[in-house]
Image (cartoon, helix red, strand yellow):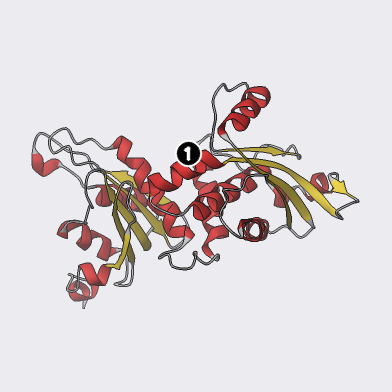
């Protein structure tokens, strides 16, 4: 997998091109492609991506990333299922098959990096991975498709090391961002303390939740338990990681939520905690709940 990187901007992070090629290679590997492929990636400003969005999609506004696959995939099929179609895009000059074009808005990437509290490099890496899977036939119009695409993104980005001097991994960033997105769905008319959560399960699926308050305060449910119960209702039984974010302050899991998490996780489960717009911190469930009531205590 090779990536043709095109940009004349002088405000890009250092050594970005080889990093993005590594992301593209990881995406192709996660998809299981066995034939040589390549794609082009262009970094532009808001005006340029606005014009492209309008001309190609009829959408009159800028966006963060656009992808234009060269292959038309049948419904329900992705690149791994369509080797014959991909081979039709063979380019003799590169000796590989062309997957399509990616366009990223640098201003939008900067805004989103600031919003989520991580580096610009990380944001561009995610946008590249997201677009690569679009080039390979993935979409997120339906919730079930979005879940599948998110799992593939996490699979591709998980193996990439974080930038030197930064904590966490790219997987952590995406999980945290999923929690941030849930802040908009929070129902907190009494406390006005909005919380979002996202849980990563051992099978790669991610489930999200938000706090839902009630006039009878005892009927309120925290974001962590909302996400946890959604995961269990969908068949998940082992939690690997959770991200919890507050809109106005760090949202530490309450004691009840910590106990619920302990029912489906080991003490080394990672707990990411933060406030929207700020960097999160990483802890283990064992640190937050050193003495929990465990299954073994009840069953033995």
Q: Is residue 74 visible?
A: yes
> Where 52 falls versus 267 (above or below)?
above
Residue 203 in the image, given as x and y percentages of width and height: 47, 60
Q: Nearer the viewer, residue 270 or 52?
A: 52
The quadrant of the image that shows the C terminus is bottom left
Query: What is the quadrant of residue 155 in the picture?
Result: bottom right
The residue at the far bottom in this view is 300
> Where 278 falls versus 210 (above or below)?
below
> Where 285 falls versus 192 (above or below)?
below
Q: Nearer the viewer, residue 211 or 20?
A: 20
The quadrant of the image that shows the N terminus is bottom right
Residue 150 in the image, given as x and y percentages of width and height: 51, 49
Q: Is residue 77 visible?
A: no
Q: Nearer the viewer, residue 109 or 153?
A: 109
The residue at the far right in this view is 92
Q: Which residue is mark 1?
A: 143
Query: What is the quadrant of residue 28 in the picture?
Result: bottom right
Query: What is the quadrant of residue 35 in the picture?
Result: bottom right
Which residue shows up at 52% across the image and 39% down it? Answer: 107
> Where 17 falls versus 180 (above or below)?
below
Side (left or right) of 26 relative to 293: right
Which residue shows up at 45% across the image and 41% down it? Answer: 111
Which residue shows up at 41% across the image and 46% down it? Answer: 114
Residue 227 in the image, given as x and y percentages of width and height: 32, 49
**Label 1 crowding class (10 Å Cα cut-off): few <14, some 14-19, many 20+?**
few
Residue 140 in the image, given as x and y percentages of width and height: 54, 39
Q: Label 1: state its secondary structure.
A: helix
């Amino acid at each position: 997998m090779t990536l043709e990187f095109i940009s004349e901007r002088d405000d890009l992070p250092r050594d970005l091109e080889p990093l993005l090629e590594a992301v593209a290679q990881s995406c192709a590997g996660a998809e299981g492609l066995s034939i040589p492929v390549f794609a082009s990636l262009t970094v532009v400003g808001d005006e340029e991506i606005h014009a492209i969005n309008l001309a190609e999609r009829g959408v009159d506004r800028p966006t963060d990333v656009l992808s234009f696959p060269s292959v038309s995939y049948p419904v329900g099929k992705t690149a791994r299922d369509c080797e014959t179609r991909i081979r039709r895009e063979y380019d003799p000059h590169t000796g590989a098959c062309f997957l399509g074009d990616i366009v990223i808005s640098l201003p939008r990437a900067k805004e989103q990096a600031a919003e989520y509290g991580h580096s610009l490099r990380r944001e561009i890496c995610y946008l590249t991975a997201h677009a690569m899977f679009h080039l390979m036939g993935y979409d997120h119009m339906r919730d079930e498709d979005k879940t599948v695409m998110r799992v593939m993104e996490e699979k591709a980005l998980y193996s990439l090391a974080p930038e030197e001097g930064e904590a966490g991994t790219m997987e952590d960033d995406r999980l945290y961002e999923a929690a941030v997105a849930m802040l908009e769905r929070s129902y907190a008319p009494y406390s006005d303390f909005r919380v979002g959560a996202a849980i990563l399960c051992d099978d790669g699926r991610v489930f999200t939740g938000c706090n839902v308050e009630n006039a009878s305060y005892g009927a309120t449910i925290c974001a962590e338990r909302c996400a946890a119960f959604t995961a269990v209702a969908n068949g998940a039984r082992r939690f690997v990681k959770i991200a919890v974010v507050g809109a106005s302050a760090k949202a530490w899991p309450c004691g009840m939520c910590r106990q619920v998490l302990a029912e489906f996780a080991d003490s080394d489960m990672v707990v990411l905690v933060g406030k929207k717009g700020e960097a999160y911190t990483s802890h283990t469930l064992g640190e937050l709940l050193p003495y929990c009531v465990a299954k073994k205590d009840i069953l033995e």
